[in-house]
Amino acid sequence: MAQQTLREMEKTIHDKASQRCILPECGAVYGVRERIYVCPKCGGPLEIELRLPPASERAGLCKLWAVRAGSRDARDISGVWRYRELLPFEDAAPFVTLFEGNTPLYDAPRCADYCGLVGLRLKHQGCNPTGSFKDTGMTAAITQAVVLGAHTAVCASTGNTAASLAAYAARAGLQAAILVPHGQISAAKLAQSMDYGAAVLELDGNFDDCMRLIQELGDDPSIYVANSINPFRIEGQKTVAFELMQQCNWKVPDHIVVPGGNMGNSTALGKGFEEMLQLGLIDRLPKLSVVQAEGSAPLARLFASLGPNPSAQDFHLPNTMTPVKQPRTLATAIKIGNPVSWRKSLRAVLHSHGQIISVSEREIADAKAMIGRDGIGCEPASATTVAGIRKLVAAGRIQPEEEVFAVLTGHVLKDPDYVNQYHRGTLSMDSGDGPQPINGSFRNVPRRVAATKAAVLKSLDQRS
Ligand code: F0G
């Protein structure tokens, strides 16, 4: 009987989704219960191909999702599982949730002004349970790990994926192991992973070395890989696009701008918008742009080499991307020289007519402080968005009156050392020729003041 039910369940899930190699010359298709991370035939990247709901059900989706927002069912409260019609899981899947998603979309008038825009909105994915956007993907990846009966979930990480994996694995009662570059990730992120009980393995090497190892470890049947190379992660992460559209009444903005590291986030957003377009929930795609840090910008370099206006229609995806051997940036979350999902991300950006650019350390630091001035705050990697938007406006790629959304990916408390150093004027960057100070424009230096009323009032007077 139990066997029968499982087989029936499998039939339904196979009717709903499959895994497909994205390379046009291969395009091999696999079942969603196969534990694979790259195409076994050609080594190409995989993505989930959904059989979208029939036309008769499509019109009701937006209403159904709106109603669920007021429900008390755990699957409806989660800002990921609420959209389960578009996820490659059974209704009865053993979903593992920390009530991720449901993140705010803020107006940011000071940042808008700073960028030269009439308005700017910030979608703060740092307000997820472990403080970063990774949770929306991790709920799906760890649920799939449970479906497959995995024992140990692992990831390579610059800190946030690790914290998220550690938390969701703990919820599911799975063992978690995280591979992080020794001495190169923020102490706050490392502390989270320790607290959630993961095996924390600090490797001598950089993130790209950790990622290479993960790809080798993925062959081991005891291991479940939870990096964004895993297409189920992308499925969870794509729901931010649905939530965003729901938050603005399905009116498509002109631009969505995200930071770029391993390129899972941009891939996921691109997929979410494509699916909404296919379903007829939106009538056009927003331009999706990605911003990397100058010292870790292999995809921005490749993009620049494609000419001023590359677009998917008349363009074949390049087969190779030259990695950055020694990536550098103080935005450690995106200190990545060889992003695994570059091809999927580039495809999404080209298809939406967006851009991939890079910004300097100083631009990131000042943009981050400006986001703080709007009362919002984020970690350094997230601030590449506002720095990038400012650059795109100055270059005429974004018009001042266009509607622009930036996705902030991590909470301000993810990297307090950076914040303290910026404001105290001790932040510096070593690009190989010794540390160079970053003299931020918006420093807010704490003052030492005598413990008297007069001294406090005098100090406030001097400030205004
Ligand atoms: N912003 C933050 C705060 C991140 O932690 C990351 C990636 C990114 C942006 C880039 O997103 O990789 O999808 O392009 N962090 C990964 C990690 C690499 O291990 O936490 P991406």
Image (cartoon, rainbow, N blue to C red):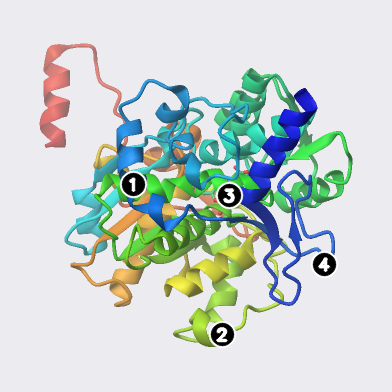
**Which part of the image, by quadrant, shows the C terminus?**
top left
| The one of 17 and 340 positioned closer to us in this rendering | 17
Q: Earlier in the sequence, mark 3 or mark 1?
A: 1
Residue at label 1?
60
**Which part of the image, by quadrant, shows the N terminus?**
top right
101 lies above or below 231: above
Q: Residues within 10 Å of mark 3 (few under 14, many from 20)?
A: many
Give the x, y percent position of residue 408. Answer: 40, 46
Residue at label 3?
234
Q: Is mark 1 within 8 Å of ligand 1?
A: no
Secondary structure under the numbered disc 1 in the rendered image: helix
Secondary structure under the numbered disc 3 in the rendered image: helix
Classify residue 61 as left or right of residue 17: left
| The one of 461 and 412 positioned closer to us in this rendering | 412
Give the x, y percent position of residue 27. Answer: 72, 69
Q: Amino acid at mark 3?
A: Ile
Q: How far is the residue under mark 4 from the one under mark 2?
A: 22 Å
Look at the image and tell me whether residue 85 can be seen: yes
Q: Which residue reaches farthest top?
A: 452
